[in-house]
């Protein structure tokens, strides 16, 4: 009879790593840095605006709450000097998230740069910069930062730590659950013990690394600042710092759980005592696991946006279900390769646990998808939605492979030997040593004539090793067990990539937020926010000599009643253009109002102004600007703006 032999562990792990690396490279290569949940939805002055006089302050509006520090908004003059007072003002009102910084008095004309950096409510850093001009644009020596917030080597290390913390959490929680619920005998199996303990160590080290890297990750981006005590103190005062500190404390409780599981519980022989201890471990372990999962829910995605009171417990359930499935799968893979005597009943019990976890994942994932995506268009047109589709596809593949594993489980036969495997069996590599067989059999007769306790003990160990090797050869030759190993290994490979996609999703701006920010940005191009000045840019071409340029129009305060109008006529290179005449007309077509003519006065070359421009009612107004560049060359350009 021809038998199928399972691959060696070293070869299997190598294949797993190669497959995971290939899939990760295909998925993540060339991906743009992920943005966080909060987005800048507006500013006053707007990006590229030219205002007639220096504003008293610069305001920024965000899509959701952000954490501002004293240096979050900086305004730099054309020479790169600070033009702001450094005092951040909280202008939030209701659902509007707005912050401002005052400007110094007597600012000269020129182009000013606004650089801002803050932390989103879901713990991710965001930053940006834009320019506006007073009087007329000018050259500026300010260089905008090329590195995105949270980027560079610090961002890469922080991302690796986040991935390792997710993976280690899954193995720690899922491994403990697998032993308690599916395979109690696994508590005494050394490879299983090592796997769970290493997961605890990895999660602890990753959490410490994130705590140290948090300050440069959200601030300077310099790796040396990871050991700055002042920065660490500031981190500990934030929501994320409190969550990471709480995670470390809970990991202390988890260490006690692991010690009891692989110590007292593994040594218990009395069924009643073992059952009572298992109940206590299960209850306490669930509380600790939910607490650790809560440190993510309280500091990241679920804590902000819509329905946070529902989203946070749903997120905890989602993380626990992921851990029960993927963490249990990891320990099962270790058991199948390093302790092949794992019983069919244990695999069947895990299959039921995995099925229940999938049901929880489907329900919680559906809610999370609705909450973060919001529309069908966001599912296909945003990076978050596209990554979510990739995750759903990987889940479908994982379920297909799990179905194959379940078929192998149904055909799996329990080991025929009833002898209880020893710890030595769990540590064997599955290859028989024929020389050991000879050494064990030859001295047996000699020992009968001259009993030697030390020699007898040595012979007993040799015979046990030979018997273990023989049993492992027989089990490795079982085609059903070999098929189960291969399918579980493939599941684990896909799970590695799935976890990577999930990690990327946690730092990607949700589709709902991205679409809202896009709508706000497009609206800002053609309409004024009711409580802000109107600043629009109108390119023109009269067709004559020196007939191309741009009109920048400012209507302040951009509301009904009297407004101040400023027009700046510029050449394509940004220099002022002197034209013979400029006329403006305002029309509210929905109410058949207008056109209302405005005749601005020439102030200086390229600058025209009119005061007391009356806007009788709110609505969508068409602003028409007529530019004449010679006696015969002129053109009329228009743009619609919403005036409140």
Image (spheres, rainbow, N blue to C red):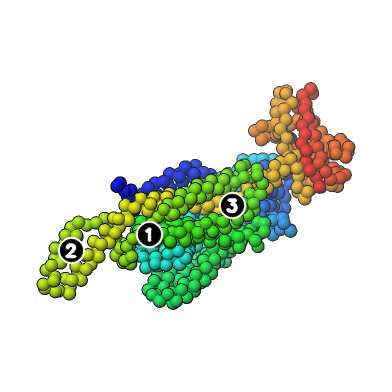
Which of discs 1 and 2 lies nearer the camera? The answer is: 1
Q: Residue at x 38, y 75 (%)?
A: 269
Q: Residue at x 66, y 49 (%)?
A: 374
Residue 134: image x %, image y %? Answer: 70, 44
Q: Residues within 10 Å of mark 2 (few under 14, many from 20)?
A: some
The answer to whether the residue labelled 1 contacts the one labelled 3, judged by CB atoms less than 8 Å apart, is no
Q: Which residue corresponds to mark 3? A: 36
Q: Residue at x 72, y 53 (%)?
A: 56
Q: Residue at x 35, y 50 (%)?
A: 479
Q: Which residue corresponds to mark 1? A: 414
Residue 361: image x %, image y %? Answer: 56, 56
CA gap between label 1 and label 2 equals 28 Å
Q: How many marks?
A: 3
Residue 137: image x %, image y %? Answer: 67, 40
Residue 182, compared with residue 570, is above or below; it is: below
Q: Which residue corresponds to mark 2? A: 440
Q: Residues within 10 Å of mark 1 (few under 14, many from 20)?
A: some
Which structural element holds mark 3?
A: loop
Which structural element holds mark 2?
A: helix
Q: Is residue 217 left or right of residue 105?
A: left
Residue 182: image x %, image y %? Answer: 45, 64
CA gap between label 1 and label 3 equals 50 Å
Q: Which mark is first along the chain, 3 or 1?
A: 3
CA gap between label 2 and label 3 equals 65 Å
The answer to whether the residue labelled 2 contacts the one labelled 3, judged by CB atoms less than 8 Å apart, is no
């Amino acid at each position: 009879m021809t038998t199928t032999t399972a691959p060696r562990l070293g070869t299997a792990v190598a294949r797993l790593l190669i497959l995971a690396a290939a899939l990760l490279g295909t998925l993540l290569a060339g991906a743009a840095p992920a943005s966080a949940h909060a987005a800048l939805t507006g500013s006053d002055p707007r990006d590229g605006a030219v205002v007639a006089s220096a504003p008293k302050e610069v305001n920024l509006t965000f899509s959701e709450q952000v954490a501002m520090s004293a240096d979050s908004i900086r305004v730099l003059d054309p020479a790169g000097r600070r033009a702001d007072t450094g005092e951040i003002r909280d202008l939030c009102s209701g659902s509007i998230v707005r912050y401002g910084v005052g400007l110094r008095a007597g600012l000269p004309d020129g182009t000013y740069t606004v650089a801002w950096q803050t932390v989103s409510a879901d713990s991710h850093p965001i930053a940006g910069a834009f320019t506006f001009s007073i009087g007329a644009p000018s050259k500026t020596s300010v260089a905008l930062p090329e590195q995105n917030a949270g980027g560079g080597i610090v961002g890469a290390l922080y991302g690796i730590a986040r991935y390792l913390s997710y993976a280690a959490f899954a193995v720690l929680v899922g491994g403990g659950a697998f032993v308690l619920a599916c395979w109690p005998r696994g508590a005494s199996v050394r490879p299983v013990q090592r796997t769970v303990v290493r997961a605890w160590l990895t999660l602890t080290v990753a959490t410490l690394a994130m705590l140290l890297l948090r300050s440069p990750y959200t601030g300077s981006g310099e790796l040396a600042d990871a050991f700055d005590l002042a920065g660490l103190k500031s981190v500990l005062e934030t929501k994320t710092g409190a969550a990471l500190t709480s995670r470390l404390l809970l990991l202390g409780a988890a260490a006690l759980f692991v010690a009891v599981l692989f110590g007292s519980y593994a040594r218990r022989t009395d069924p009643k005592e073992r059952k009572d201890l298992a109940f206590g471990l299960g209850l306490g372990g669930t509380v600790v696991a939910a607490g650790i999962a809560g440190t993510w829910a309280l500091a990241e995605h679920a804590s902000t946006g819509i329905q946070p009171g529902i989203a946070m417990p749903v997120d905890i359930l989602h993380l626990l279900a992921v851990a029960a499935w993927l963490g249990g799968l990891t320990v099962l893979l270790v058991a199948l390769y390093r302790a092949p005597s794992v019983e069919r009943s244990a695999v069947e019990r895990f299959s039921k646990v995995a099925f229940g976890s999938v049901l929880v994942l489907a329900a919680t994932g559906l809610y999370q998808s609705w909450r973060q995506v919001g529309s069908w268009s966001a599912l296909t047109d945003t990076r978050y939605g596209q990554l979510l589709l990739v995750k759903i596809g990987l889940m479908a593949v994982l379920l297909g492979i799990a179905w194959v594993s379940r078929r192998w489980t149904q055909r799996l036969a329990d080991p025929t030997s009833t002898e209880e495997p020893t710890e030595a069996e769990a540590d064997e590599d599955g290859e028989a040593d024929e020389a050991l067989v000879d050494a064990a059999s030859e001295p047996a007769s000699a020992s009968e004539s001259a009993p030697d306790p030390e020699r007898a003990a040595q012979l007993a160990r040799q015979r046990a090793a030979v018997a273990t090797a023989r049993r492992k050869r027989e089990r490795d030759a079982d085609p059903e067990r070999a098929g189960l190993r291969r399918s579980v290994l493939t599941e684990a490979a896909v799970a590695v990539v799935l976890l990577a996609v999930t990690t990327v999703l946690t730092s990607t701006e949700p589709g709902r937020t991205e679409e809202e920010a896009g709508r706000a940005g497009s609206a800002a191009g053609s309409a004024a926010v009711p409580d802000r000045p109107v600043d629009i840019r109108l390119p023109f071409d009269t067709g004559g000599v020196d007939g191309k340029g741009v009109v920048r129009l400012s209507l302040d305060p951009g509301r009904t009643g009297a407004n101040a109008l400023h027009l700046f006529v510029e050449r394509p290179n940004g220099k002022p253009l002197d034209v013979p005449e400029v006329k403006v007309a305002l029309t509210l077509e929905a109410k058949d109002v207008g056109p209302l003519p405005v005749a601005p006065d020439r102030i200086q070359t390229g600058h025209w102004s009119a005061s007391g421009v009356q806007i009788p009612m709110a609505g969508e107004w068409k602003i028409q600007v007529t530019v004449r560049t010679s006696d015969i060359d002129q053109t009329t350009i228009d743009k619609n703006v919403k005036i409140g």
